[in-house]
Image (cartoon, helix red, strand yellow):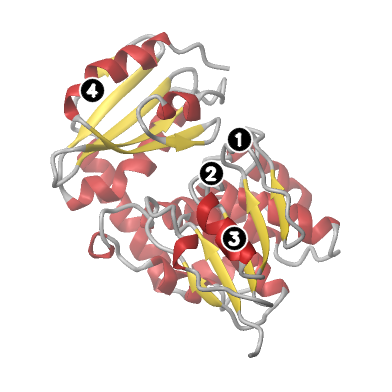
């Protein structure tokens, strides 16, 4: 049996841009496994076996540990790039894990670090900057843009592109999105330079336009809690709200960098999901807060997939009591 390759990633900007960098560097045929922002347990969909290769980008190893162990036991080789909290990284000859939990990095930057530092390939660094901007890592993205020598106009275009790609990943179903992440990935992969993608693919502007409309609707809603250390907003069970939740959380964090933010969205089953951001001025603790309510994430940003509405008050109390940083 011939060797198979699988690329597995989150469908947001960081995940897609990480794999785009890799496949532009190594243009081998591979089966892409991705999904919505909330679809994290993706490794269980990968039928890799003896001799196969699996690239994993921007997926919590903690959430995928059982499936990872099974894939390794079947004889596949796994290269894993990620920045989400994990208690233990397994030791296995088939696993190459590059995990960095620093609050100032993301998966696209980890792939860039590997390709430029160990492979000597700096051709696709602009895609790493797009992923960083999409993941709300503006200082890190700007430092990379400095290293590349990007002019200001190009930076603004790529920042807007990263934010748009990230926005497109949010929803309860693909019908909430303008384009499925897998289709968006195939369009991205056509362009070694993300500026070419932004200029030549109409989908980039279409996503950005829809994002602006959704943000305008969210701006009219009052906060559930507006305190000295944070703000909490609850969005309705509507497609536009499901799309805008993560982008809105990032926008609010940038607007008030000294405060934490949580954007909840009502689901059709009556539960809530949340996008949580630690203060940009002290980007640590979001994952710890989310874990108290069954969620997960990384130091600067986390999420809760399902929370009972009656726990909202307890969540606000926990957020207010957090000592960020």
Residue underneath mark 2 = 62
Q: Residue at x 59, y 38 (%)?
A: 86
Residue underneath mark 4 = 311
Relative to the observer, which residue lies in front, 37 or 98?
Answer: 98
Q: Residues within 10 Å of mark 4 (few under 14, many from 20)?
A: few
Q: Residues within 10 Å of mark 1 (few under 14, many from 20)?
A: few
Q: CA distance from mark 2 to mark 1?
A: 7 Å
Regarding mark 1 in the picture, which secondary structure is present there? loop
- The residue mark sitting in front, 1 or 4, is 1
Relative to the observer, which residue lies in front, 40 or 90?
Answer: 90
* Among the two numbered marks 3 and 4 on one chain, the one whose residue lies closer to the N terminus: 3
Regarding mark 2 in the picture, which secondary structure is present there? loop
Q: Residues within 10 Å of mark 2 (few under 14, many from 20)?
A: some
* Among the two numbered marks 4 and 2 on one chain, the one whose residue lies closer to the N terminus: 2
* Among the two numbered marks 1 and 4 on one chain, the one whose residue lies closer to the N terminus: 1
Q: CA distance from mark 4 to mark 2?
A: 24 Å
Q: Are marks 3 and 2 in contact (CB under 8 Å)?
A: no
């Amino acid at each position: 049996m011939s060797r198979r390759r699988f690329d597995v990633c989150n469908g947001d900007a960081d995940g897609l841009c990480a794999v785009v960098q890799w496949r532009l560097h190594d243009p081998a045929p591979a089966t892409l496994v991705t999904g919505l922002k909330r679809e994290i347990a993706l490794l269980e969909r990968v039928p890799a076996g003896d001799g196969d290769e699996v690239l994993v980008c921007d997926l919590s190893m903690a959430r995928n540990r059982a499936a990872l162990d099974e894939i390794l036991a079947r004889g596949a080789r796994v290269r894993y790039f990620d920045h989400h909290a994990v208690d233990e990284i397994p030791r296995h000859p088939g696993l190459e894990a590059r995990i960095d939990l620093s609050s100032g990095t993301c998966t696209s930057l980890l792939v860039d670090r590997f390709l430029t530092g160990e492979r000597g390939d700096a051709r696709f660094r602009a895609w790493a900057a797009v992923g960083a901007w999409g993941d709300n890592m503006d200082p890190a993205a700007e430092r990379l843009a400095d290293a590349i020598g990007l002019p200001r106009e190009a930076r603004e275009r790529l920042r807007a592109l990263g934010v748009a790609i990230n926005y497109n990943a949010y929803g309860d179903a693909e019908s909430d999105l303008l384009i499925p992440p897998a289709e968006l990935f195939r369009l991205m992969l056509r362009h070694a330079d993300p500026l070419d993608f932004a200029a030549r693919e109409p989908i980039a502007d279409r996503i950005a336009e829809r994002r602006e409309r959704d943000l305008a609707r969210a701006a009219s809603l009052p906060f559930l809690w507006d305190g000295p250390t944070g703000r909490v907003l609850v969005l309705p069970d509507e497609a536009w709200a499901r799309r805008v939740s993560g982008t809105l959380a990032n926008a609010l964090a940038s607007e008030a960098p000294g405060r934490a933010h949580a954007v909840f969205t009502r689901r059709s089953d009556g539960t809530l999901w949340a996008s949580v951001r630690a203060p940009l001025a002290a980007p640590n603790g979001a994952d710890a807060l989310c874990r108290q309510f069954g969620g997960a994430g990384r130091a600067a940003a986390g999420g809760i997939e399902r929370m009972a509405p009656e726990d909202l008050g307890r969540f606000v109390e926990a957020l207010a009591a957090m000592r960020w940083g």
